[in-house]
Amino acid sequence: MYKLYSQRKKEAEQGISDVYIYDKFCRAFRNQYLHIVEDVFGIYPDVKYIYKPNGKNIDMWEFVCQAYAREKGLKSLQDRYADATNTYEAYEDYVDISDDSDFLDLLDFTFTEIISNKSIFGHGYSEVVNLAIKELNFRFKQHSLGYEFINGKLIPKINEFIHTETIKPALHLLNNKIFEGAEQEYFQAFEHYKKGQNKDAILNAIKAFESVLKSICQEMNYPYDRERDTAKQLLQHLTDNGFYPKYLESHLNGIRSTLESGAPTLRNKNAGHGQGQEVVDVSDEYVEYALNLVATNIVLLVKILNAKKR
């Protein structure tokens, strides 16, 4: 993507901000987003891509508007200045006038449910979709918006360095049928974090980590109790079976100790029990700690597994 001179000058002077924006989408980003979706769906009748449910042709704009309106509990997406409903004009108008929360819902739904489902567009359009996702992520970064579209899901970014070096590699490694449950739980942790449901975010992060350990035990044919074993017990199974290289044993035992006193403790104390009369609040830094700690160890363990399988 081309960077305008003003953008290059701003980045040279200040750098791209690592303090992310999550709840405000400027006019320029909304316009750029609309251009990206236009590249995928087309605007004019002779270049529109067509979806064919049960052999019936439907304009892609009509299809996405109808599907989104159903999920939002709306009758239709109707623009302000015409009688058009569920058309390109209605979608464009919604991008223009919706509040930031509704706009994020539209973006998330369009890319997660429609654009990432490449089979809708038929053979030959994968590259169009890939370019759209690439530009969307570029525009997020350009406007310091704390999101990235990875593995068909929209996730919030906590810190650029941690996201690039830890969370993103973990997500790529989890994008494997072996770790399907763990991937779903880790994405769910980010969904809860994005909505401010911090206790549930921690709980799902730990579930993801435990699911990775169970998957490793399954792959390596180590005996374990799928229903009862905790992270501590699962890590002990790996140790007992020599999963770790000998020269890493001391180091990995230290990691296990950190996990036992860190993220699992947060889960047990703040997310796994009743609150009583006082509502327990889990602050964002605890959630970020749990997400980062789990991601770091997922990367390490899955890489060890992949090396053993090779």
Image (spheres, rainbow, N blue to C red):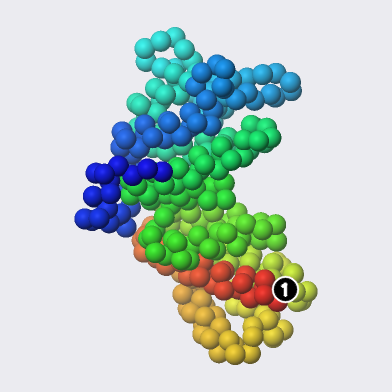
* Residue ID at (51%, 76%): 259
Q: Residue at x 56, y 69 (%)?
A: 299
Q: Which residue is drawn at the image coordinates 70% and 57% (left, top)?
A: 177
Give the image quarter of residue 17.
Answer: bottom left
Name the residue nearer the viewer: 160 or 6: 6
From the image, tell me which residue sits under label 1.
Answer: 310
Residue 193 appears in the picture as rendered: yes
Numbered circles on residues, count: 1
Q: Residue 122: give x, y in percent of width and height.
A: 68, 32
Quadrant showing the C terminus: bottom right
Quadrant location, the N terminus:
top left
Q: Secondary structure at mark 1?
A: loop
- Does the rendering let one see residue 76? no
Disc 1 residue type? Arg
Q: Position of residue 210 (x, y in %)?
A: 61, 68
Looking at the image, which residue sits at the far top?
83
Residue drawn where x is 37% and y is 43% of the image: 2
Circle 1 residues within 10 Å: few <14, some 14–19, many ≥20 = few
Q: Quadrant of residue 297?
A: bottom right
Q: Position of residue 161 (x, y in %)?
A: 39, 64
Residue 222 in the image: state x and y as whole percent: 75, 76
